[in-house]
Image: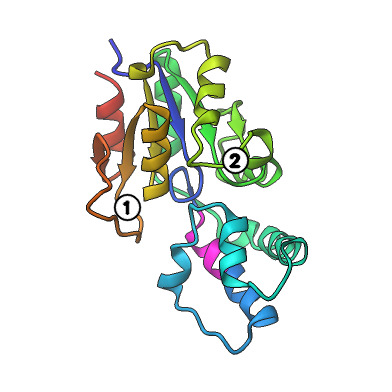
Amino acid sequence: MNNYDLVLFDMDGTIANTDAMIVETFHRLYNVYKPTVIRSDAELLYFSGPPIKETLKNEFPDYPLDEIFPAYRDISRGTYEDFIKEFPLVRDTIISFIKKGIKVGVITNKNSSNADLTLKIINLRDVIDYCLGSDDIPASKPDPRSAEMAMEHFNIKDKARVLYVGDNTIDYTFASNAGIDCALLTWGPRKFSSSTKPKYWVKDFEELSKVVTR
């Protein structure tokens, strides 16, 4: 018997290696809107996870959101093909879950159009057919309602049978708010506070497979 009936994934940093894309996008954005400000790659990597509109408000307070957000979106879209990469074993692991009867979905703060393009680039569009982007849900993570939507879609009643897989603190907070278990991948550059206490720490998808299946 599997340990979970439904596994939900974050996207950036979890099933898609988007770190280089995020860094490149923000470097280009700063070059245009804050050319005197220099951010390190390490600083920019922490912009992966939180809702992008919140980050843009904090980083570019002198520009209205209806100007800076479209600029970010246009610059970001132009970096996808060159900078987004696949992570090892993600496709094979997800396919193995599905073959064992486990439902799989994605919940991301990326908008649905960019999420769909990302799935295509990392060769998962034919495998994952349920993906909630920021424009599909009432509020972005860590608001828990998208987890409830996913459970309803897959007709999963027991929260103890649902696992959310992410790579940063906002994913842990989201899972906690939703009352579901969380597994955090440690393969990225992000550091975690002592208050971040997921049920599982996993270093890669091979370890994740052992958590999900028996």
Which mark sits nearer the N-terminus, 2 or 1?
2
Find residue 119 and name its label.
2
29 vs 58, nearest the viewer: 58
3D distance between C-alphas at marks 2 and 1: 20 Å
The answer to whether residue 12 shows anywhere in this view is yes
- Could you say where residue 98 lies in the image, as x and y percent from the top left? 45, 19
- Could you say where residue 105 lies in the image, as x and y percent from the top left? 52, 28
| Quarter where residue 188 is shown | bottom left
Q: Is 201 rendered above or below residue 33?
A: above
Residue type, label 2: Leu
> Dot 1 corresponds to which residue?
187
Pointers 2 and 1 in contact (CB under 8 A)?
A: no
25 vs 123, nearest the viewer: 25
Find residue 122 and name its label.
none
| Quarter where residue 58 is shown | bottom right
- Could you say where residue 14 lies in the image, as x and y percent from the top left? 43, 45
Residue type, label 1: Trp
Are there few (<14), some (14-19), or many (20+) residues within 10 Å of tag 2? many
189 vs 39, nearest the viewer: 39
Magenta range is: 18-24
Point 40% across, 32% down: residue: 164
Q: Is 55 rendered above or below residue 95?
A: below
Point 28% across, 10% down: residue: 1
Look at the image and tell me in which quarter the C terminus lies: top left
